[in-house]
């Protein structure tokens, strides 16, 4: 990355190498992506470092230093990928102010502008204090003594500015090494004034695996292939880009395995170890054997050669001429016995970049998994830190960014292998398939690997039309994506980059595909009777949704509740006046899908208008939430919601997680309507697809809205019962009659064990 210009400005004057309007906006539902208009001064940024135009941003007296840096796009050298950073009193802001795609063929025109929104401010206020109270050593000690997972081992603390509307404040950014016992790799901010510790980003990325990922199905015979890069006269698998290591039992007998190099070259300099016999559990499940170390290096080396041929950069390590490390046979040990790990993960650190787990079969043998993990590395490099943080929307909260990260990693693997199906050896039907029919919001479930199939599906469909040139354009588009990017913003970046790199016709093709998938404008409201119409996400039961806890599991946090990733729309058919929604509530990511024990769920219900949410920042990682709703029903974790309405009316239902640390999975969602029928006849209960079900009526003691439908309630506190609910009694005209009542959970039989295996293996990616 090349610094083009640095200058000091006050108030509204900023200088740099971009014609941008840097006005960071509040992180709400509307995408912060735009195509700027106006005339821009032409510049060849590769030959000179001169100004394009003044950039305006209100700083309220804070002297702001702007630094603009650019790299050429791989899809077309005439396109430039810009990142605009700033500092106050010599201290950098925590994240870039803006990103831009510049067309060098058109007078330096800014074709796409993405403003920073994660700061959630409309201006950059002056520093509360420009002289730090803490020093780097003090910040490191606070993090290490916090006792939080992943908080130990950091050696560097960087002073940064957390921008605020009225004032900005100093914080220390601490990035410890990956905790390979807890399998976490967080980034912390330590408030310089208060010493408060905030966990702002999780860097660890896992593969989405359910079983033992190996890939001898695609190429069932182990053959001899040349490596593309290996250091001269080396005894071990180490080249200018990668080194491979193996994981063996620690000397103490218990704890994380020790990474060492086992595979050694023979007298000819080759690594020709025999392959394990596929189908023999003893050979496939052998820990510490050298063949998997060779396979891990081979896959990484082979993928690099392919990307290099396309002109695509690979990993952040390579930008600094450092070597990335891939470790095979990773596991922990107890009293000398290995503990199977059904996963793989990417950390972003050069000394421990990718870990391939070892179980009854060896993950390092599966190229799909290796390519997927290094796909996260491409995201890390291109976006400048990864895509990971959930965005609050008007009607829901979902981690689009994490989903795009996972979807792109799947897309990389599929393009490289020419096969849309991921890890077909490990999964009876494959882990995930980019050749799918998933739509947004209909098929959103709130799990980033599953939701990633929406992005990979659209990208794969476009790739089949446009080929490798489109893949390279998608890689370039990652540079336009912020850490909390949405499907809409990602779509805009992909479309704009494709249009500039491949031409208007290609751009129109991609726009049509992404729009048809619902990614250009995803409402986050799904018709309940259409859930599952796009097919079943591999590893998940039909009609599933995960309702994440408000704090503790993912960033940012929410208080006093976190809305579901999508809300349901229920339209009452003619002649129907009651509806019973039933579902199972189980603990996600557990071996046996145990019942939820520590979770309080609520259901926001509104008639004829969607439930809407308002967000206010409580810090750089927490939002306070209120809901515009007719009704708030608590105890929604009990498994049913009953609605009464006039025929033809529409209800909107949004689940929310209020309290508890369990991670609830809502599964087997169904709805049954009942009513007198079109002509006053008695109608047996009817399911959402029109089939006949059991009779369903509204029972006594229903909780009603107690207000006119045109009157909205602000819901925030389940203890106070806000939301206009009244216990029992007649329903006022225009109100909604609703109740939450327990229903017996249908037997899941054999699907429980299968899903349990999936979720227990799918720790965060």
Image: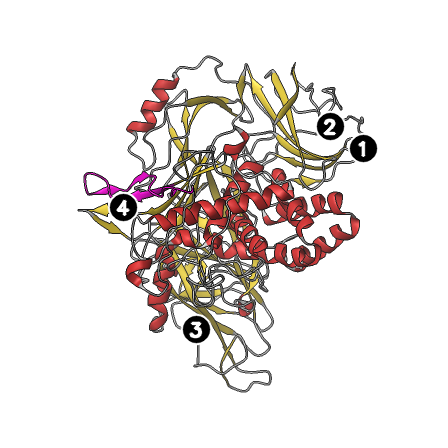
186 and 3: which one is in front?
Answer: 3
Which residue is tagged 2? 19
Q: Which residue is mark 4?
A: 332
Q: Residue 385 at what x, y percent from top left? A: 52, 35
> Left or right: 539 with respect to 485?
left
Residues under labels 2 and 1: Cα distance?
10 Å
Q: Is residue 112 left or right of residue 617?
A: right
Looking at the image, tell me whether mark 4 or mark 3 is earlier in sequence order. Answer: 4
The circle on residue 623 is none
Crowding around mark 3 (Cα neighbors within 10 Å: few <14, some 14 to 19, many 20+) is some
- The earlier-in-sequence mark between 4 and 1 is 1
The quadrant where residue 88 appears: top right
Residue 228 magenta = no
Q: Are marks 2 and 3 in contact (CB under 8 Å)?
A: no
The image quarter in which residue 466 lies: bottom right
Of all residues, the one furthest to the bottom in this rendering is 681
Q: Disc 4 vs disc 2: Cβ atoms closer than 8 Å?
A: no
Q: Which residue is mark 3?
A: 698
Lower sequence index among marks 4 and 2: 2
Which type of secondary structure does the marked residue at label 4 adopt? Answer: strand
Number of the front mark, 2 or 3? 2
In the image, is residue 203 above or below residue 96?
below
Task: Determine the CA span between mark 2 and mark 3.
Answer: 61 Å
Outermost residue, top side: 131
Specify whether 271 is left or right of 512: left
Query: Do callouts 2 and 1 mark residues in contact (Cβ within 8 Å)?
Result: yes
**Disc 1 marks which residue?**
38
Whether tag 4 and tag 3 are in contact, CB under 8 A, the answer is no
Disc 1, SS: loop
For marks 3 and 1, the one nearer the N-term is 1
């Amino acid at each position: 990355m090349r610094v083009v210009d640095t200058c000091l400005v006050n108030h509204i004057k900023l200088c740099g190498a971009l014609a941008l309007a840097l006005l960071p906006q509040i992180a709400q539902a509307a995408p912060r992506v735009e195509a700027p208009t106006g005339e821009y001064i032409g510049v060849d940024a590769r030959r000179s470092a001169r100004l394009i135009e003044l950039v305006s941003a209100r700083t309220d007296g804070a002297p702001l230093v702007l630094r603009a840096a650019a790299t050429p796009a791989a899809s077309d050298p005439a396109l430039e990928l810009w990142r605009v950073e700033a500092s106050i009193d010599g201290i950098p802001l925590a994240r870039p102010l803006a990103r831009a795609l510049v067309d060098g063929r058109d007078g330096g025109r800014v074709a796409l502008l993405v403003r920073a929104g994660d700061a959630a401010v409309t201006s950059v206020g002056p520093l509360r204090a420009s002289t730090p109270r803490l020093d780097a050593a003090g910040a490191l000690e606070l993090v290490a003594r916090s006792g939080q997972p992943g908080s130990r081992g950091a050696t560097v603390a960087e002073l940064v500015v957390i921008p605020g509307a009225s004032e900005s404040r100093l914080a220390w950014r601490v990035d410890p090494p990956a905790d390979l016992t807890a399998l976490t790799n967080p980034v912390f901010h330590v408030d310089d004034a208060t010493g408060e510790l905030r966990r702002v980003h999780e860097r660890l990325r896992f593969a989405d695996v359910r079983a033992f990922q190996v890939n001898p199905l695609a190429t069932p015979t182990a053959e001899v292939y040349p490596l593309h890069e290996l250091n001269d006269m080396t005894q071990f698998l180490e080249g200018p880009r990668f080194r491979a290591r193996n994981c063996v039992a620690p000397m103490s007998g218990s704890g994380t395995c020790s990474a060492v190099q086992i595979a050694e070259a023979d007298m000819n300099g080759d690594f020709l170890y025999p392959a394990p016999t596929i189908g023999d559990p003893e050979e496939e499940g052998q820990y510490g054997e050298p063949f998997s170390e060779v396979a891990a290096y081979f896959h990484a080396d082979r993928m690099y050669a392919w990307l290099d041929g396309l002109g695509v950069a690979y990993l952040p390590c390579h930008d600094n001429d450092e070597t990335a490390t891939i470790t095979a046979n990773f596991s922990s040990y107890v009293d000398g016995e290995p503990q199977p790990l059904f996963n793989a993960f990417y950390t972003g650190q050069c000394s421990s970049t990718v870990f391939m787990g070892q179980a009854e079969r060896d993950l390092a043998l599966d190229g799909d998994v290796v390519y997927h993990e290094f796909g996260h590395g491409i995201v890390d490099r291109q976006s400048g830190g990864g895509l990971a943080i959930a965005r609050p929307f008007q009607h829901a909260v979902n981690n689009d960014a994490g989903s795009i990260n996972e979807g792109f990693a799947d897309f990389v693997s599929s393009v490289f292998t020419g096969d849309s199906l991921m890890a077909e050896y490990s999964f009876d039907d494959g882990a995930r398939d980019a050749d799918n029919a998933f739509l947004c919001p209909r098929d959103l479930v709130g799990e980033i690997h599953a939701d990633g199939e929406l992005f990979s599906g659209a990208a794969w469909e476009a790739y089949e039309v446009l080929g490798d040139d489109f893949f390279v354009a998608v890689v370039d588009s990652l540079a336009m994506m912020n850490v909390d990017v949405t499907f809409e913003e990602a779509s805009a970046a992909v479309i704009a980059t494709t249009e500039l790199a491949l031409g208007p016709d290609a751009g129109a093709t991609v726009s049509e595909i992404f729009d048809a998938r619902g990614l250009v404008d995803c409402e986050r409201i799904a018709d309940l009777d259409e859930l599952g119409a796009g097919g079943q996400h591999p590893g998940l039961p039909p009609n599933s949704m995960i309702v994440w806890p408000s704090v503790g599991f993912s960033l940012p946090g929410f208080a006093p509740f976190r809305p579901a990733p999508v809300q349901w729309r229920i339209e009452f058919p003619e002649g129907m006046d009651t509806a019973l929604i039933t579902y199972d509530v189980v603990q996600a990511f557990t071996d046996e899908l145990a019942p939820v024990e520590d979770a309080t769920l609520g259901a926001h219900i509104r008639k004829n208008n969607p439930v809407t949410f308002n967000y206010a920042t409580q810090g750089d990682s927490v939002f306070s939430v209120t809901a515009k709703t007719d009704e708030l029903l608590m105890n929604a974790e009990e498994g049913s919601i009953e609605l009464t309405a006039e025929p033809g009316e529409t209800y909107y239902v949004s689940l929310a997680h209020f309290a508890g640390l369990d991670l609830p999975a809502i599964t087997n969602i169904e709805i049954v309507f009942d009513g007198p029928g079109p002509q006053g006849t008695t109608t047996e209960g009817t399911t959402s697809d029109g089939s006949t079900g059991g009779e369903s009526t509204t029972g006594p003691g229903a909780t009603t809205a107690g207000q006119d439908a045109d009157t909205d309630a602000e819901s925030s506190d389940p203890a106070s019962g806000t939301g206009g609910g009244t216990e029992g009694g007649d329903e006022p005209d225009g109100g909604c009659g609703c109740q939450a009542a327990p229903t017996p959970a249908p037997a899941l039989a054999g699907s429980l064990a299968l899903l349990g295996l999936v979720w227990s293996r799918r720790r965060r990616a």
